[in-house]
C-alpha cells in the first residue's frame, strides 16, 4: 500500500457487519474496527518494528510495507491468498490450542478482561499452509453521546443549508444546463458547417477526379494515336532507308563506272601523250617515210582506234586529218630498184598542212567545249593539261577535259 491517508471499508466478520478503517502514517499503522449494530469500537496502533517482529515469530517474515499491502488487499478482497477474521480472546486461545495439541491457556483468571479485546487476524494462505498474523485491538467502548449529538447537529445544519440552497441551486443548475446546451448546440452547428464544407470538398474532389479520368482517357487516346503515327513513321523510315540504300548502291555503281571511265581516260591520256611526243618529233625533223610505211602506220592506228571503241565519226575525222597531213607532206615515191632520186622537201606544202591541222584542232575544241558543260566539274579537275602541250598549242594550262577528249579522238 502506497501509504494512503486513510482507507475505510465495510467487512463482514462471522455474519456481523463491521466498519474497518486503516491509516498508515509514516512507519505507524492505525487500525479501528466498529460494530455497525452495537457501535462498539476497537482501536490499535502498531509501528514497523512490532509488525516485523510479529511476522518473524510466525516463521514467515514480512516487511512493514509488504504487510500493509497485504492488509489492503485483504480489505478490498483483491487477492484470494489473503483474508481477514475478527476473533475474541477465547476464539484465539481455541485456535492456539488446536495448533499446539489441546493444552490449556495460562491466563484463565484474566479471561473476562481479555475477552473485551478483539484480534484482527490477517490470514495468508500459501500452497500447503495458512499463516495467521494476529493484531490485538483494545476495546474503546461506545461513542460519547455528547460527541454524537454534536455530530448530529452539524449534520442537520448542513442539511438545512443545502435545502435552503436547493431552489437557487436548481435555478443555477437549469441555467448551467441551458448554458451547456447552448454550447453544445453551437459546437454541433460548427461541426455541421465543417461537415458541409468537407462534403463540398469531397464533391469537388469527385468532380475533379471524374475530369481527371476523362483527361486521362483523352491522353491515353492521344498516346495511342501518337504510337500509331510513330509506327507509320517507322514504316516509312524503313522504306526510306531501303530507298536510300538502293540509291547508295546505285551511286556506288555509278562511282565504279566513273572510276573505270577515269582509268580508261588516263590510259587514253598516256596514249595521246606518246602520240603527241611522236608528233612533235615529226615536226622538228620530218622523216621521209615511204608510202608503204605510212599506209602500214595508218592501218595500225585505225586498228588501235577500233580496239578502243571509238566512234565512226572520230575515226573518220582522224583519218581526214592524217590524209591532210599526208597531203601536206611531199609524197615521195618508193625507191625503185633502179635507184631513183628522193624528192626534195617542200616547205610551203608543210606550212599549209600545219595551218590546216591547227584549224581542225580549233574546231574540235569548240565542239567539245560545248559538250563539257554536261560533265561534272570534279571529273574535269582530275586531268590537267600538260604545260608543254598547252604552250605548243597556245592553250591555257588549266584543267580541260575537252582537250583530252580531242586528243583521244
Image (spheres, rainbow, N blue to C red):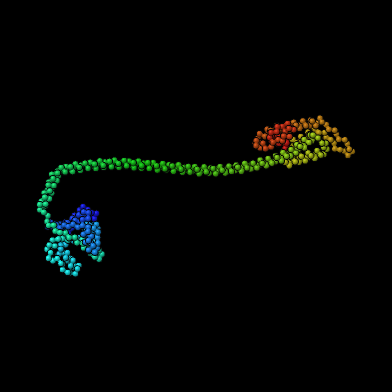
As rendered, which of 375 and 33 lies closer to the eye? 33
38 vs 80, left or right, is left
Which part of the image, by quadrant, shows the C terminus? top right
Compare residues 333 and 190 and report the one nearer the observer.
190
Q: Residue at x 13, y 66 (%)?
A: 108
Residue extending furthest toward the front: 49
Q: Using the image as rendered, state which of residue 44 and residue 238 is in the foreground.
A: 44
Q: Position of residue 378 (x, y in %)?
A: 65, 37
Is 321 situated left or right of 8 in this image?
A: right
At x 85%, y 34%, the residue is 343
In percent of width and height, residue 169 lies at 16, 43
Instruction: Inspect this view and state whether residue 368 appears.
Output: no
* Quadrant of residue 210 within the rendered picture: top left
The quadrant the N terminus occupies is bottom left
Residue drawn at (82%, 33%), measured in percent from left and top?
330
- Count of marks overlaid on the render: 0
Q: Position of residue 93 (x, y in %)?
A: 16, 65
* Residue 269 against residue 20 in the figure, above or below: above
The answer to whether one can see residue 105 in this image is yes
Whether 108 is drawn above or below 46: the answer is: below
Q: Residue at x 21, y 52 (%)?
A: 5
* Name of the residue lying farthest toward the right: 338
Q: Is residue 132 above or below residue 153?
A: below
Amino acid at each position: 500500500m502506497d501509504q494512503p491517508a486513510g482507507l475505510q471499508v465495510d467487512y463482514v466478520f462471522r455474519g456481523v457487519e463491521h466498519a474497518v478503517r486503516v491509516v498508515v502514517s509514516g512507519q505507524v499503522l492505525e487500525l479501528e474496527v466498529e460494530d455497525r449494530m452495537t457501535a462498539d469500537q476497537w482501536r490499535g496502533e502498531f509501528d514497523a518494528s512490532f509488525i516485523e517482529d510479529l511476522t518473524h515469530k510466525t516463521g514467515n517474515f514480512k516487511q512493514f510495507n509488504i504487510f500493509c499491502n497485504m492488509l489492503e488487499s485483504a480489505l478490498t478482497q483483491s487477492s484470494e491468498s489473503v483474508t481477514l477474521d475478527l476473533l475474541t480472546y477465547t476464539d484465539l486461545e481455541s485456535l492456539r490450542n488446536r495448533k499446539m495439541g489441546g493444552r490449556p491457556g495460562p491466563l484463565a483468571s484474566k479471561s473476562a478482561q481479555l475477552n473485551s479485546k478483539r484480534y484482527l487476524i490477517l490470514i495468508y494462505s500459501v500452497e500447503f499452509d495458512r499463516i495467521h498474523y494476529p493484531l490485538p485491538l483494545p476495546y474503546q467502548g461506545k461513542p460519547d453521546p455528547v460527541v454524537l449529538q454534536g455530530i448530529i447537529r452539524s449534520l442537520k445544519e448542513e442539511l438545512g443549508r443545502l435545502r435552503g440552497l436547493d431552489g437557487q441551486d436548481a435555478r443555477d443548475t437549469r441555467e448551467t444546463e441551458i448554458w451547456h446546451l447552448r454550447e453544445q448546440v453551437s459546437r454541433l452547428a460548427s461541426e455541421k458547417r465543417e461537415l458541409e464544407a468537407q462534403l463540398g470538398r469531397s464533391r469537388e474532389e469527385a468532380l475533379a477526379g471524374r475530369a481527371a479520368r476523362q483527361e486521362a482517357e483523352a491522353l491515353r487516346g492521344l498516346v495511342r494515336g501518337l504510337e500509331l503515327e510513330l509506327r507509320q513513321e517507322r514504316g516509312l523510315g524503313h522504306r526510306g532507308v531501303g530507298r536510300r540504300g538502293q540509291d547508295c548502291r546505285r551511286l556506288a555503281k555509278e562511282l565504279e563506272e566513273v572510276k573505270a571511265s577515269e582509268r580508261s581516260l588516263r590510259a587514253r591520256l598516256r596514249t595521246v601523250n606518246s602520240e603527241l611526243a611522236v608528233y612533235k618529233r615529226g615536226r622538228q625533223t620530218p622523216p621521209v617515210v615511204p608510202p608503204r610505211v605510212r599506209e602500214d602506220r595508218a592501218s595500225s592506228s585505225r586498228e588501235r582506234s577500233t580496239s578502243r571503241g571509238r566512234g565512226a565519226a572520230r575515226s573518220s575525222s582522224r583519218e581526214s586529218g592524217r590524209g591532210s597531213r599526208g597531203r601536206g607532206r611531199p609524197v615521195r615515191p618508193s625507191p625503185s630498184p633502179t635507184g631513183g632520186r628522193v624528192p626534195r622537201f617542200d616547205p610551203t606544202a608543210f606550212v599549209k598542212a600545219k595551218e590546216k591541222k591547227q584549224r581542225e584542232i580549233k574546231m574540235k575544241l569548240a565542239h567539245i567545249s560545248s559538250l563539257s558543260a554536261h560533265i561534272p566539274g570534279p571529273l574535269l579537275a582530275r586531268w590537267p593539261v600538260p604545260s608543254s602541250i598547252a604552250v605548243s598549242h597556245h592553250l591555257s594550262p588549266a584543267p580541260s577535259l575537252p582537250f583530252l577528249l580531242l586528243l583521244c579522238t
